[in-house]
Image: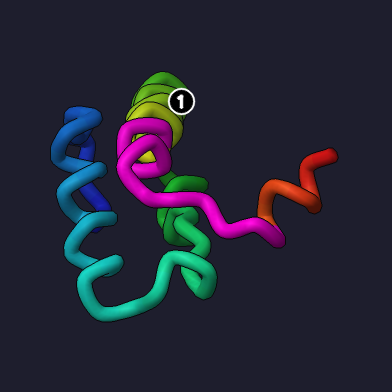
Amino acid sequence: MRTLAIESDEEVAERMRSVLEVVPHERVYFTTDCGMRVLPRLVAKEKLKSLVRGAQVVRAEVPSSPSRETARV
């Protein structure tokens, strides 16, 4: 959603959770939309921080698969 409002970490996490209700976590990659380019740099940076923190929250809630752990080694 293209807006200057900076979403909270929990708002981002909740959107991610709603996707994970219908798509298995192994098949999901969260990213920004291409609209970040037109936002003021400070706003874009803060939105990215919210995306990262929201992903960290959700990642802690999702059980990791063995193949994912092996790939990190």
Q: The disc labelled 1 sits on which kind of residue?
A: Lys
Q: Nearer the viewer, residue 27 or 33?
A: 27
Q: Nearer the viewer, residue 65 or 45?
A: 65
Side (left or right) of 22 relative to 31: left
Image point (57%, 58%), residue name: 65
Q: Which residues are magenta?
A: 56-67
Examine the rendering and report whether any part of residue 44 can be seen.
no
Q: Residue at the bottom extreme?
A: 22
Side (left or right) of 32 relative to 5: right
Residue 37 vs 35, above or below: the answer is: above
Residue 48 vs 37, above or below: the answer is: above
Is residue 40 within the magenta segment? Answer: no
- The image shows a total of numbered marks equal to 1
Examine the rendering and report whether any part of residue 64 can be seen.
yes
Question: Residue 26 appears at what percent x and percent y?
Answer: 52, 68
The secondary structure type at the circle numbered 1 is: helix
Image point (24%, 30%), residue name: 9
Give the main secondary structure, helix, strand or loop, of the magenta stretch: helix
Question: Residue 61 appears at what percent x and percent y?
Answer: 31, 42
Q: Residue at the right extreme?
A: 73
Residue 61 vs 44, above or below: the answer is: below
Image point (41%, 20%), residue name: 42
Image point (67%, 55%), residue name: 68
Question: Residue 71 appears at what percent x and percent y?
Answer: 80, 52
Q: Quadrant of the N terminus?
A: bottom left
Chosen colour scheme: rainbow
Is residue 64 within the magenta segment? Answer: yes
Q: Nearer the viewer, residue 54 or 72?
A: 72
Q: Quadrant of the C terminus?
A: top right
Location of mark 1 (residue)? 45
Label 1: few (<14), some (14–19) or many (≥20) C-alpha neighbours in 10 Å: some
